[in-house]
Structure formats: C-alpha cells, structure tokens
Image (tube, rainbow, N blue to C red):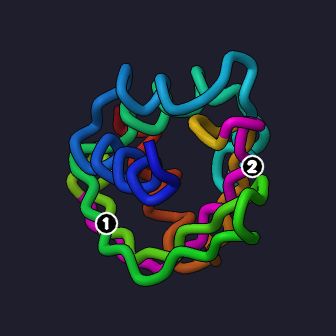
Amino acid sequence: MTLEDLCHRYLDALNTGDLESVRALFVPGAEIVSPLYGVRPAHDFYAELFADTARSETTLLNVFDSSAGGRSVALHFRYVWTLASGKVVEFECVDVFELAEDRQRFTKMTIIYDTAPLRSDFEASRKQT
C-alpha cells in the first residue's frame, strides 16, 4: 500500500465512521494527541470520537510527506463534523502521523486545530448524549 493509499483509507474510514477500519490503520498501542480528548490510545479515541459523531465529511487540502522513506506525514483537511447532538461544526485541521517503519500503519497521531470556535458546542453535545 502506498502512503497516499494509507492516507485516503484513513479519511474514508473517518468519513464512514468505520471503527474497525480506522483501528486497523494503527499499530497496537498507537497514541492519539487531541486538543479536545487529550492523549488517548487510538483504540479508545476512535470509539469515543465515533460515539460523539453523527456524521463526518472531510475534504483533503494538502498532504505533507516528511521525505521519501520518512517516518511522518501530515494531512491538512477541512472537516465538517456533525456532533451527536446534530450541531454542525466546520474547521480546518492538520493531522500529523508518525509511521511504522514499513510505512503501512500509523504509530501516533497529533491533531492540530483551534478548538475555541467549537469547544462549547462539543461540550454541550457530550452532555446531551
């Protein structure tokens, strides 16, 4: 699988809410660093994220590869996130992935975006569910 395929599989799994497919893209013990959820094991993070999500729609804007054979890649995308409450929030974000040595799965992901415009909607939605 190419790095491009891996990245597209990630966004496809995020868009469809396919928990098992997204988990399969991460090595056991992989970690997610999220501005809303904190530091979580990938296995737990996606279960929690999908429980808080009614719908996800991503539009890929850029892919930044660290270098040929490098161990990191970043996806810059527009995210239209429908929270479980039905509230829709839209923002741009960057997900920075650390890659396994064979570049076939992720070992860590750090999510970067400004949470200020959506934090109150997110917290209100979590209280409702």
Label 1 Cα neighbours within 10 Å, binned few <14 / some 14-19 / many ≥20: some
Element class at badge 2: strand
Looking at the rendered structure, the kind of residue marked 1 is Thr
Q: Residue furthest front?
A: 68
Q: Label 2 belongs to which residue?
A: 98
Q: Residue 20: percent from the left, percent from the top?
A: 37, 20
Which amino acid does the dot numbered 2 rest on? Glu
Q: Nearer the viewer, residue 92 or 97?
A: 97
- Residue of label 1: 58
Name the residue at 50% across, 70% down. Answer: 118
Q: Quadrant of the C terminus?
A: top left
Q: Residue at x 75, y 70 (%)?
A: 66
Question: Which region is colored magenta?
Answer: 87-102
Q: Quadrant of the N terminus?
A: top left
Compared to residue 64, the image places residue 10 above or below, namely above
Vertically, is 61 above or below 56? below
Answer left or right for 3 relative to 69: left
Q: Is residue 118 visible?
A: yes
Is 5 located above or below residue 75 in the figure? above
Question: Which of 83/77 is in front?
Answer: 77
- Taking depth in this image into account, of 103 and 25 the one nearest to the observer is 103
Viewer-nearest of discs 2 and 1: 2
